[in-house]
Every structure is written in C-alpha cells, then in structure tokens.
C-alpha cells in the first residue's frame, strides 16, 4: 500500500503517527514499518499516547471521510473502498474548501511531494545509515529480571546474575552496530549484537517480537 501511495504522491518528508498497531513503540523502540520509512528518508513523529488532539488534521479528516462515505451503508469492503476513493477525490479536487477553490488548486503541492519514488529503485535508495542515526539518538531504560536478563525487540539479552534487578540504560552504537548497556552512572556493562537491525530484516519487516508481560 505504501509503495503505491508513494509512487502516486511522492515520498513525504515526515509522517505523524499514533501509538496503535502497527506504529506503537515497542518499549521505546520503533517498529519495523517505522524503520523502513526512516531508511527511505521519511521522518517518523509519534504523538503522545492517548492524545489524538496532537494530530488534529488527520483526526478531522478521518471523521469527515467517514461521514461522507457512510461505511455502515456499504454492503461489501470493495464498495466501501470505491466510496472512499470517490469522496477523497471530491474533497481534494472539487469541494470549494479555500476561497472557493478546491484544495489541489489552493495548495498545488498536494499533487506531489516533489520527492519521486519508484519501487524498482528502493533497494538502491534505502539507506541503513539513516536508521542507525535515528536509533543512536535513543536512550532506553530497562530493569534486569531475576536472571539478569533484559529484553530488546522482544529478545532476551543476558547481563548476568550479578546485575539481576538492576536498572540500566540501553543505547545503540552505530560505529559497531551493537546495543550498549550501561548502569545509571554510565559505566558500560555489556555490548550485544543487533542482528534484528540488519538491512535484510528491516526490508523484510522482520525486526522483532512484541514483549510479553514478563519482560522488563
């Protein structure tokens, strides 16, 4: 879906998302879809959990589109899709929204972002370094369990029983592409490989598991 949209409208410079599936942060870590977008050069901005007012244009647009398309009166999913396409086109290209003009006339930039996208060029244009730069700016907080393990992207990383119950910080070091775990005084405790962040796994949207209740 995203590839079709980007081919038609161009790559956006940023997307603002909520914390529901598939955008929700995995204990502070961006999900696979967000990492894929970052590699394309699309910034991802999360609103605060439970604060839809921080994304007012999208929320209002969803409400208006739902009123116009009337999903409850559609007999099939295909019929709903046809109505959504039709009503979105009307809102963009016909409805006199701005000084008697439709939005595409008032804001010509809506026709295309100016950043072309071709699916055939994606592997060449997609840059793992963009992902690394984003992750390098994060600081995660974890507490080791009774066995001295913490979880990163749903996988256990063992600090050892000497650190059981300890609160630690986790950062990503792009120089060697490893997770660096420190204590609260920033003394390094251990480094872990990050195989889940390989180019192949991100492009396959196969980054990690969601965490269970027993993970810290």
Image: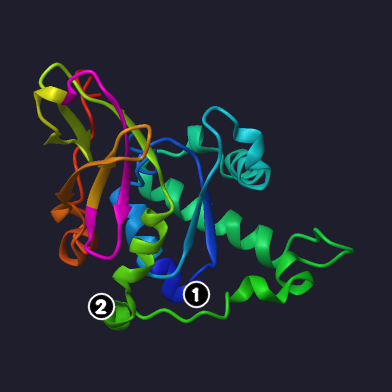
Residue, x 36% and y 42% (percent of image)? 76
Relative to 67, is 25 on the left or the right?
left
Q: Earlier in the sequence, mark 1 or mark 2?
A: 1
55, 195: nearer the viewer: 195
Label 1 crowd (10 A; few <14 / some 14-19 / many >=20): some
Q: Is residue 82 left or right of residue 95?
A: left
Question: On residue 10, which mark appears?
Answer: 1
The picture quadrant where one finds residue 178 is bottom left
Residue extending farthest right: 99
Check the image and tell me how it is coloured: rainbow
Q: Bounds of the magenta span?
A: 163-178
Q: Is residue 193 above or below residue 121?
A: above
Q: Position of residue 148 (x, y in %)?
A: 14, 25
**Horizontal placement of 195 versus 76: left or right?**
left
Element assignment for label 1? loop
Q: Looking at the image, is 91 positioned above or below residue 56? A: below
- What is the spatial separation of the Cα atoms under label 1 and label 2, in whole angstroms? 17 Å
Residue 185, x across and y down, in percent: 38, 34
Circles 1 and 2, Cβ within 8 Å, touching? The answer is no
Question: Which mark, residue 123?
Answer: 2
User: How many marks do you count on the picture?
Assistant: 2
Does the magenta run of residues contain 118?
no
* Residue at 36% from the left image edge and 81% from the top image edge: 118
Q: What x and y, as percent, mark residue 101?
A: 82, 67
- Location of the N terminus by quadrant is bottom left
Residue 77 place in picture, x, y as percent? 37, 44
Q: Residue at x 89, y 63 (%)?
A: 99
């Amino acid at each position: 879906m995203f590839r079709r949209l980007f081919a038609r409208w161009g790559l956006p410079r940023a997307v603002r998302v909520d914390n529901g599936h598939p955008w929700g942060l995995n204990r502070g870590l961006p999900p696979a879809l967000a990492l894929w977008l970052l590699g394309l050069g699309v910034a991802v901005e999360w609103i605060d959990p439970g604060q839809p007012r921080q994304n007012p244009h999208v929320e209002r647009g969803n409400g208006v589109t739902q009123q116009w398309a009337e999903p409850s009166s559609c007999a099939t999913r295909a019929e709903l899709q046809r109505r959504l396409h039709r009503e979105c086109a009307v809102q963009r290209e016909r409805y006199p929204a701005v000084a008697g003009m439709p939005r595409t006339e008032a804001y010509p930039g809506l026709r295309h972002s100016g950043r072309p996208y071709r699916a055939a060029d994606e592997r060449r244009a997609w840059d793992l370094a963009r992902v690394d730069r984003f992750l390098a700016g994060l600081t995660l907080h974890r507490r080791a369990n009774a066995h001295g393990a913490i979880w990163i992207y749903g996988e256990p990383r063992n600090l050892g029983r000497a650190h059981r119950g300890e609160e630690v910080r986790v950062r990503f070091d792009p120089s060697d592409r490893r997770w660096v775990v420190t204590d609260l005084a920033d003394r390094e405790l251990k480094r872990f490989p990050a195989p889940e962040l390989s180019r192949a796994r991100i492009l396959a949207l196969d980054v990690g598991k969601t965490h269970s209740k027993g993970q810290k």
